[in-house]
Each structure stands twice: as structure tokens, then as C-alpha cells.
Amino acid sequence: MLPLETHHIRALANVAEQAINRTLEKEGPRSPRPTGEVSAVRKLVLDGFDEIAHAWEPLLRRWSLRIELSAIFTHSRPHVTFTPTRYTRGTGRCELADLLIVVDHQDYGGVIQDRRAALVQAKRLKGGEIKLSGSDWTQHELLLDLPAFSFVDPIYAPGPRDIRTAPQVGDPDFTAEYGGVEVDGTPRHWAFWIPASPDDLAAPLALGTWLARMAAGLSMTGRMAESHGTDDWSATVEELLRVTGALPIVMSDDTILRKNPNVVGRVADMASYLSVPTGLSAAGGPRKPEMEDYWPEGPISTVHLTFRQVG
């Protein structure tokens, strides 16, 4: 994607990782210090990527590149149905993911030359590890095997999506990642794992490194997609971006990214959309501590980074 040398990628990874760690440790302008999965995703989307874009901008400017950011947190996620074959447990209905990350590279004329995308399922680390249990394995099968699935919510087009088979765009093995977030220990951090067979997670990579490698178009970090592509994977990425982006903005900040003239961005918080009110459970009763990780049905949170050649 980006025409960068190894030391350039390393520099982007280092500053991104520092920005992520700072963001997780403190109260931010748009979200509190995270205590679970929901608040960690909100923190990353609304404050973390703002910090990353700001840290990357002076580096990218040296290389005649401009970064644009659109980050939208929804406090919801779309559910899908499929026919499970790997596990007898589970019903074949589960969430698709918590977050969609898309990275585009545009030429001087603004035409998208390369797109990478990945679905991210956030999991709070327990003892430094991601520990799946119960219905988690249904989603593990979905993210690992990528069987044909259909969306539950009618805001998405009906009918099955087969994002693994022909016409195949990109490497299906890197369609989805598990994002393990440390919010209990020190230092706080994010790392990404890929779902592995049969009941495993593999190749953990710090989020800052993963993101820098994805921006550079390196392997094992995100899957290639085509802008306005007709294959099921590319079309689903476009639809997820479009549905989330079409929702009414609850909170926006026109001064994001420190009014940097070289960075165009938008950060939106749609957390009130189908969210659980503070202090209440999904049923309206007293809220239990684990309800901090409650995700209702609805559009997915999205982070869309665009790099453009300038100068």
C-alpha cells in the first residue's frame, strides 16, 4: 500500500503503540478510561485513532502523504446467521464483529489504488490471555471458517454472503482478528490474534505494529478488498461503511486532530444508538458489572483511514 521502507514502518509502529498505550491509561476528550470491552473499543475508536493520526501526520508529511480519518463508535454490532459444522455447540447465530478497520491508499487524483480491511472482535484479556468459552466458539467458527452468512438486521441487504470462495479477493485467512485488550494490569495495551484451527488463536501482534504493517500493505495484517467491488467480501466492506456512516451523528467535533491543516478527519459518537443506559441492564433492571461488555444489535463501529499522495 504505502511506498515505505522498513525503518519507516517501524517508526509508524512505535509512535502508534505509544499513542495507544497513552490512550488506554487516561481519561480522554471523548471517552473515559476503559474498564471493559465496550469502553475499550469506544476509547480506541474515538480517542486512540485520533492520537495515532496526529502522531503519524508529521512522519507521513515527510514522505509526501496525507492522512484522513473517519472514526465512528456505535455501541452496537451486527448479528449474522450461518450453518455451523465445526462445533456442535452454538446455534449458528452470533455477532459478526465489534469493529471494522479499513485502510485506503489514494493516488494524486484521489482514486483508491489499494484497500485493506479487517473485522475485529474485542476481548478483554484474562491473565494476559484471550479465553473463549460457551457461545464464543460459534463466532470463532464464523471468523475461522468464513461460512456463508446472512445479516439479521434488515438495515443490511438480505441474502447470504460468501466471503471466502470465488470470486476471491485478498487472503481470507486474514479477514478477521481478535483484539485482546488489557484493562486490568499494567501496562495497558491492545494486541491482535488471528483465529486458528481447531480451537486456538495465533500470531499475536501489538496493535501499533499491526496497523503500521496494514498501512504498508504487508502480509498477515488485514485482507485486500476492492473499492466498489462486486465480490461478496468487498461489497460487504462497502455496505458496513455505508450503513454506519448514514446514521445520524449524535456527537461530532469539528476541531478534531488539533485543527491540523494536513489531516482531515471526523470522529462521531453514536453510543446512544440502542445502547444500555448507565446503571441499567438490557432488561431495564439494575446493571451488573459484566454489563459493561453488553453489545446490542445494530450497525458496526468503523475506522476508515485514507492515505493520499500529495506534493
Image (tube, rainbow, N blue to C red):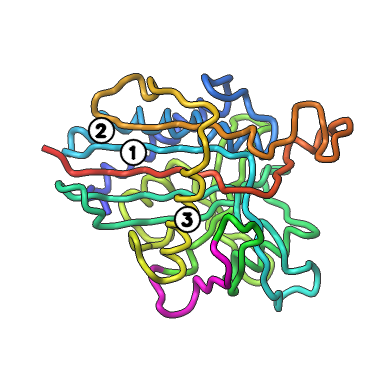
Question: Closer to the observer: label 3 or label 2?
Answer: 3
- Label the magenta part by its dominant secondary structure: loop
Residue 196 in sight in this render = no
Quarter of the figure that contains the N terminus:
bottom left
Q: Dot 2 corresponds to which residue?
A: 59
Residue at (57%, 21%) from the top-left corner?
Answer: 26
Q: Amino acid at mark 2?
A: Leu
Residue 167 in sight in this render = yes
Residue 87 or 202: which is nearer the viewer?
A: 87
Q: In the image, is residue 280 above or below residue 240?
A: above
Q: Total marks drawn?
A: 3
Residue at (53%, 35%) from the top-left corner?
Answer: 44
User: Residue 118 shows which numbered tag?
Assistant: 3
Image location of residue 8, percent across then percent down:
26, 42
Give the residue at the far right of this rendering: 285
Q: Would you call the spot at circle 3 few (<14 residues within 10 Å), some (14-19), or many (20 or more)?
A: many
Q: Dot 1 corresponds to which residue?
A: 12
Relative placement, left or right, of 100 versus 85 is left
Relative placement, left or right, of 127 versus 180 is right
Residue at (49%, 28%) from the top-left corner?
Answer: 47
